[in-house]
Amino acid sequence: MTVEFEKIKRQNMIKLPYMLDFYPLQDAKFTRIDRFFQNLKERKLTTTKCKACGKVLWPPRIMCPECFSENLEWINLGVDGELYAFTEMKLGAPLGFVEDVPFCIGLVKIGGLLISARIDGAKYEDLKIGDKVTLKIIELEDDRIFYRFCKVKE
């Protein structure tokens, strides 16, 4: 980021949307997808599905981007998936993850979706497409919660 951009951002002239994993607080006071985080605390990976057109949405939404309906329901995606693609982060990790490099990131097939997530506890050379992975819940230091996956031991 340029110095000018940082200066403008600090002055709150530009309100940037939060990414799913950067919501400052994961409750109904701050986000209308708080149920996603509550479900994670119960070890359930969920998302929203449009009741009007049937589209399964990822990340969870409050409105369907296909038909603009707000008539959504929560569905369970399960906890077991399959590694569809993967790579290793060696350089240029996002803020907060620099100390963790190298680490693996993958696309996981789960619940009919492809979800991007960190793959914990695996080295790049030990992964292959088609590996079975399972949900791993991460409790962050600031009491937030998020998800990752880890390879299922054969």
Image (cartoon, rainbow, N blue to C red):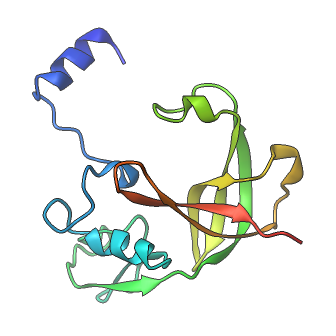
Residue 20, position as x, y percentages in the image: 37, 55
Residue 136 or 105: which is nearer the viewer?
Answer: 136
Report the side of 23 relative to 149 (left or right).
left
- Report the residue at 73% width, 55% height from top: 85
- Report the residue at 72% width, 40% height from top: 88
> What is the residue that sits farthest to the bottom in this orientation?
51
User: Residue 64 is drawn in which quadrant?
Assistant: bottom left
> What is the residue that sits farthest to the top in this orientation?
3
Report the side of 80 relative to 7 (left or right).
right
Q: Quadrant of the N terminus?
A: top left
User: Residue 99 is drawn in which quadrant?
Assistant: top right
Above or below, 86 against 130 in this view is above
Above or below, 139 against 2 in this view is below
Mark count: 0
Residue 23 or 82: which is nearer the viewer?
Answer: 23
Residue 16, position as x, y percentages in the image: 23, 39
Above or below, 52 against 55 in this view is below
Residue 46, position as x, y percentages in the image: 44, 77
- Report the residue at 20% width, 78% height from top: 70
Q: Quadrant of the C terminus?
A: bottom right
Report the side of 88 relative to 29 (left or right).
right
Residue 124 or 40: which is nearer the viewer?
Answer: 40
Residue 3, position as x, y percentages in the image: 29, 10
- Report the residue at 72% width, 50% height from top: 86
